[in-house]
Image: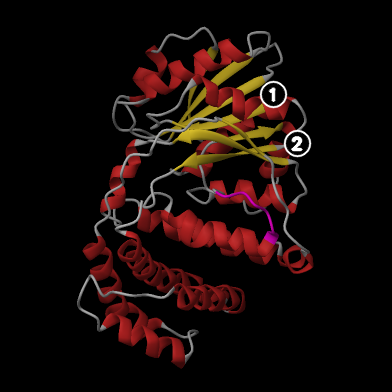
Amino acid sequence: MMKDKIDIVVGICTKNVEDTIEGVIKVVDQGLNDYFPEKKSLIIVSDGFSKDHTKERANKTVTRTEKMVLDQVGKIGKGNGVKTIFIKAEEVGAEAVALVDGDLTSITPEWLKHLVQPILTGHDLVAPFYARHKYDGVITNHLAYPLTRALYGISIRQPIGGEYGLSAKMVKKALVHPLFPAEFGIDIFITTVAACEDMKMIEAKLGIKSHDSTKDYKDPKVLLVPMFNQVTGSILDLTIFYKGLSKKKVGDRSVERIGVKEVETPKEVVMDISGYINDFKSGYEETIKEKNFFLPAEIISSLDKISENYGVEDFNFPIDLWAQIVYYSLSYYEQKKDRKEDILEILRILWQGRLASFAVETKDLD
């Protein structure tokens, strides 16, 4: 048990990231010592029951900053990894908490400056802003950002970015919240709670984000499908929880953006367009036609025509149709609480269709 109060906690969530964890820890250590040498800091590695050598390498990495490696509380899931960090941060009385992912390959010491300094000067949440390839951030661009902007008016462009800076006040609010998620929904939870609980927010430009998990975007079944279900479930649950506030929201709430000025060109993210189209078509035939209970006949008629289009080049799932589908999903998610999983499954299949259409529309654009 630590006797001295800690000023800054940097939490690193990990699961089977033996190839990257040492580098992430070393960069975090350097950033803390370069930018906050007068502060007492603690690095916490919150491990999600890795089956490789992640914990061993984290423990062996030498740092000037105090470090601890913990098994996350509860079942496997990023949200529980974050909760483990928050609990320890409260325990040691941290003034500022930063979160970074353990599979990062692009993190620099300067990230620590931009995530932590605004917290020390009065902000409650620092959200990340990255330069991303057009096929990265596929849940952000097609659902998380549009809904967050429409419902709460905040201009946080990447509300599920992964890296954050948080005040003690924000950590406390999150820990007592009844909807604290165990899994991937944690990022949108943090952003939404900050927006709805009147926290002082700012965005930090961090440049390019490269991380090992991006390679799994080629096959949506590996990572993106379970991530979509968890993130979207959190978005819809939080929308219901804060529905009184969202209805009273008036106007946009712009958020200041600070950080890195010069940014490199992001690496290309390869997307299997045919794979997304095939998953959409098979899911539509096998699932949606059987389970749909909330999309009206005119939308189903449009989807029938889309599903019958066999050419990749001509595949077209209009954005206005997608917007209508999201609206109906949100409405019925609250009305039919016993059908939540069916709604998420239907929405996920249709999201894959919209994503494929976006890829076709933009394949020749930079």
Percent coordinates x, y for residue 125 in the rendering: 67, 38
Q: Residues within 10 Å of mark 1 (few under 14, many from 20)?
A: many
Q: Is residue 154 magenta?
A: yes
Instruction: Please state if 360 lies on the left or on the right of 336 as rendered.
Output: left
Residue at point 44%, 74% (across, down): 342
Residue at point 61%, 74% (across, down): 334
Corner quadrant of residue 120? top right
The three-letter code of the residue at mark 2 reads Lys
Q: Is residue 88 visible?
A: no
Q: Is residue 240 magenta?
A: no
Percent coordinates x, y for residue 346 in the rendering: 41, 74
Residues in magenta? 152-157
Task: Using the numbered discs, state the Cα–Cα distance from disc 1 to disc 2 in whole angstroms.
Answer: 10 Å
The three-letter code of the residue at mark 1 reads Ala
Residue at point 49%, 54% (across, down): 140
Percent coordinates x, y for residue 33 in the rendering: 57, 10
Which residue is identified by label 1? 94
Percent coordinates x, y for residue 364 in the rendering: 30, 58
Query: Callout 2: helix, strand or loop?
Result: helix
Quick one: which residue is furthest to the bottom in this view?
297
Quadrant, the N terminus: top right
- 45 up-or-down from 203: above or below: above
Which residue is identified by label 2? 169
